[in-house]
Amino acid sequence: MSEHDSDVSGPDLSEGVAVESIPEGGMLLGHVGDEPVLLSRFGPEVFAIGGKCTHYGGPLGEGIVVGNTVRCPWHHACFDLRTGEATCAPALNPVPRREIVREGALVKVGGEISPADGATPVRQRQAGDPRSIVIAGAGAAGNAAAEMLRREGYSGTITMIGRDESVPYDRPNLSKDYLAGDAPEEWIPLRPAEFYAEHSIDLIRGMTVSQIDVAGRHVRLDDGSIRSFDRLLLATGADPVKLPIPGAELKHVHYLRTLADSRAIIAAAEDAKRAVVIGASFIGLEVAASLRARGLAVDVVAPEKVPLERVLGADLGSFVQRTHENEGVQFHLGRTSKSIDESHVMLDDGALLPADIVVIGVGVRPAISLAEEAGLAIDKGVVVNEFLETSIPGIFAAGDIARYPDPRSGESVRIEHWVVAERQGQTAARNMLGAREKFTRVPFFWSNHYSTSISYVGHAERWDEVLVSGNIDEGDSMVGYRLGGKILAVATTGRQQESLEAEAAMERFDWEALERFFASREGVS
């Protein structure tokens, strides 16, 4: 599931390299056989780990080192250079460690070390540890939390309840490679079903939590059964906004949120020639690209003048539009859909667009009714503190529903990104075990449009100035969104390392470094 194959390069580390050639606090890329390997050095100690990201196979040697971690250039997964552990989503699996052989001033890399040799020590039960944890939701946040609980050595009961009949799956791929036909279905599950049994995670599928009894510390499921909890994580995600127009309920009209939705669109596309996508959201445009890859003619209808302008600004949004137009997509901007019949979509100006299949992507709403009925504080999402704990102690929230204090903007935000949800799930898991770890991760998402990938770090709901470095039209650019003299977000195309560097500066709250970062690039406007 990689964007391109990682070429083996650098020295043959099985033959050995001089210790001095390994930068202190940095990394040296080499290989053992056909496998890329990273060498790192911290004082007298030398470590070797695999050089291929376990998320989508990205080349870690093209990433950057931050502290004792290496960051993947593709989707910003983090790995410990000493142990290979995946310290930050979206990667869930470690990269392999390798044996180090010292021969004087020479370092040779040997075979892989069993993961057990570098595993986190078993956590000893502590006073106040929860006996049982219930996770309502089996998406990005819920699955990441369940896995992190076991990685932290938690040995109590974990119950994860998900509405899908499937095991937790890679949701971003539903509108990207999988929908385009470039990724087989066996790549979509995050874990096989056996994983959950092996890790004593009680995964209840095809079910939702219908009620929370706060005083009784239990939840009721759709079937009337009850699960008790000492800690509860709400990770119920979001639901697609339904378009209230005539014909929106017809069989050839689809929304995309679940694996079943993506399967249905794929099946419908087999006999279709023309598609209309209503909504120029990231999901809508990724669907448009995927359907074009399947050979369908595609029209996109949206009320805005420039696609994605609210998130990316006019220049980058226009570039995305041109990218799609170059692939044959027809845009109908400044227009809305009035009605749908069996073969057409009617626009508000009376125009008729032929449609064998219609996909609606006009946004999502957080699924907060369960939390609201339980009496939790609500503000266009479930209000949580810096530890992701809700207004009721012992109940946490993560992912699309969580409105949390953003330490960079100073505002309360709710972010609908897959990686943010996973990272919040991981932090919430540690906090349910008493860690008291503030959630300060920099938001990140990526979006693919044919051969163009956009990486976005930070969060800017508004800005008063846009900085542009490079050439947007050539897909080689860095765009900064500044508010009140502070760069709150950076979007890049074709500049993966710069995206990582911007993220690292934001992690440090180093706004001056971000300013210097842009000032040092030629052609900033």
Image: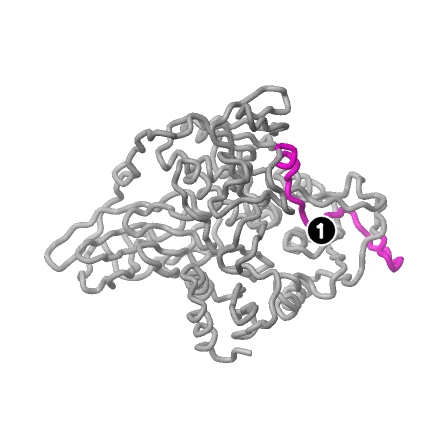
Q: Which residues are magenta?
A: 346-374
Residue 281: say if magenta: no
Q: Where does label 1 land, which residue?
A: 362
Mark 1 residue type: Val
**Left or right relative to 448: residue 506:** left
Residue at 70 percent across and 65 percent down: it is 306
Asked if 102 appears above or below 516 in the picture, the reply is above
Image spot of residue 151 (x, y percent): 37, 37
Asked if 157 appears above or below 20 in the picture, the reply is above
Image spot of residue 201 (x, y percent): 45, 28
Q: Nearer the viewer, residue 399 or 456?
A: 399
Residue at 53 percent across and 23 percent down: it is 227
Is residue 327 shown to the viewer in this render?
no
Image spot of residue 514 (x, y percent): 45, 69
Q: Secondary structure at mark 1?
A: loop
Q: Quadrant of residue 426?
A: top left
Q: Nearer the viewer, residue 385 or 338?
A: 385
Residue at 55 percent across and 61 percent down: it is 454
Quadrant in which the C terminus appears = bottom right
**Left or right relative to 19: residue 521:** right
Is residue 337 shown to the viewer in this render?
yes
Residue found farthest to the right: 350
**Left or right relative to 22: residue 350:** right
Image spot of residue 269 (x, y percent): 70, 45
Residue found farthest to the left: 104
